[in-house]
Image (tube, grey):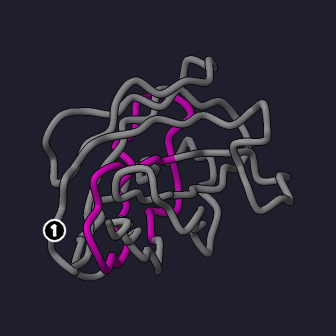
Amino acid sequence: MAEVRLIPPTLSNVVHQDTYCTDRDTIMDFKFNKDGLLTRLEVTLVPADFNGANPSTDPRAVTEEANPFDLDNNSFKGWAVLNSNGIAGIQSVSQNGVGGQSVKVSGGSWQVWVRGFNGGETKGFVKSDKLLTPSTGPSCDPIFPYDNP
């Protein structure tokens, strides 16, 4: 009998807004390109000084997962609510404005990473090219048009 192997999705081009608010909650929009079936998604935030290839090895990392079951080869869009009460943790993940993710962050810059799965198969973490930085300015939670980040 032939073994059936699941093919993991390929994720690339992780993009998110530049800032999060340190004095109020922030809706952090993000997107990435995806090729293949996505049955589980992990979103990880890790402090900017992390230098490894696997952010889950950093005890300061905060990670949550969702089960989007996305069949299309497309641009995956999601958002996260960042709470400014200073306790690291994530409650849930959302896609296309459905559900809610609450990521508790405090001071400093954070790197956003994503990891996609098809069943238990993954190609590993993909990080964004820029940092998510703290701000107290009036535009710390900018509107993030998905078609033009």
Residue 7 is left or right of residue 143, and the answer is right
In the picture, the quarter occupied by the C terminus is bottom left
Q: Which residue is mark 1?
A: 71
Of 27 and 52, which appears nearest the observer?
A: 52
Residue 38: x %, y % from top left? 29, 61
Query: Quarter-wise, where is residue 118 in the image?
Result: bottom left
**Does 119 appear above or below 104?**
below
Query: Quarter-wise, where is residue 125 in the image?
Result: bottom right
Total residue callouts:
1
Give amino acid for label 1: Leu
Magenta: main secondary structure equals: strand
- Residue at screen point 74% across, 45% down: 47
**Does 101 appear above or below 29?**
above
The answer to whether residue 38 is magenta is yes
- Where disc 1 sits, the SS reads loop
Residue 42 is left or right of residue 92, and the answer is right
- Residue at screen point 78% across, 31% down: 59
Dot 1, crowdedness within 10 Å: few (<14), some or many (≥20)?
few
- Residue at screen point 59% across, 31% down: 105
Residue 5: x %, y % from top left? 38, 66
**Does 93 appear above or below 129?**
above
- The span picked out in magenta is 15-43
